[in-house]
Amino acid sequence: MYKSTLYIASIALILLFSCNTNNDENSTSNAQPDTLVYSIENYYLESKLESKGVDSVNEKTYFEATYPRFQDDTINGYINKLITLNDNPDKHYNSMEEAGQGFIKGYEDYQKLDYSSPWAWYSKIKASVPENHKSYLGIQVYHEDFMGGAHGNYGTIFSNFNLLSKKEITIQDIILNNKMDSLTLVAEQIFKENEGIDSLQNSFPNYFFEDGKFSLNNNFLLQENSILFLYNIYEIKAYVEGVTKLEIPFSKINNFLTPQAKEILGIK
């Protein structure tokens, strides 16, 4: 599955950890009587080093995270893996604390180099639960960071968790194997409509699709009436174009859904 970068690299400085009752409107506004209850936890870690840049966005480098905590350890372990992901194969963090310490250490080590950046860094992570249903959770992890350069980076990761099997839901769990190409064709037509592209056009020269051929990624969220795909910055467009959302109604792909998908989603 596609996962956006989280630029978190290892030493503890300041630790502030708090927990409060969930009042997240996005997470609970559509809650059903049998949906899971969770709390919201916050983590903040700040470097003691002052920024050298007079035009720095913030005075000190910091790492900040907000994420849900359930009463189920399996769910918490799954979310923990999502929010501590990074693209460095030599780095692995077991907790948010380790991730924060790694980010701060990365900044402070960088400041010791001759070509260090005068600007302070920051990393923000916010995990939420936009879909909270009896049979599954839809989880969204938004990250934003700045590590010097012309601009910062940001991205959103979607994941879906089967509460019955206690496993991540993959696209193969949702779409029949012999209907994957059909799903792509439907998605392509919706994409063309959204982007104002001629329906007869077969190539996408102005996008970053491999070989100019449309394709879906694995970054999707199961919603009540649709499946939402999201392409992050640089994935299919330039940074300035931002993210691209592609929503496919289940009514258009009902015949493509697996029996498992229909059970999870409550579709007949």
Image (cartoon, rainbow, N blue to C red):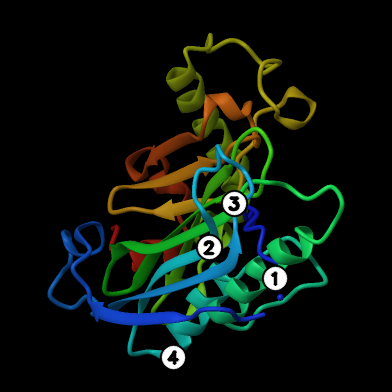
Q: Which residue is mark 4?
A: 73
Residue 65 pos. (x, y %): 45, 67
Question: Considering only vertical position in the picture, is 21 above or below 83?
Answer: below
Outermost residue on the right side: it is 114
Q: Residue at x 64, y 66 (%)?
A: 103
Task: Classify residue 231 by image quadrant.
Answer: top right
Task: Classify residue 40 by image quadrant.
Answer: bottom left
Residue 72 makes an appearance in the image: yes
The label nearer to you, 2 versus 3, is: 2
SS for dot 3: loop
SS for dot 2: strand
Q: Which mark is residue 62?
A: 2
SS for dot 4: helix
Asked if marks 1 and 3 touch (Cβ < 8 Å), the reply is no
First in sequence, mark 1 or 2: give its number.
2
Task: Classify residue 154 by image quadrant.
Answer: top right
> Considering the image in quadrants, where does the C terminus appear?
bottom left
Q: CA distance from mark 4 to mark 3?
A: 25 Å
Q: Residue at x 81, y 61 (%)?
A: 112
**Residue type at the position of mark 2:** Tyr
Q: Which mark is residue 218?
A: 3
SS for dot 1: helix
Q: Which residue is mark 1?
A: 105
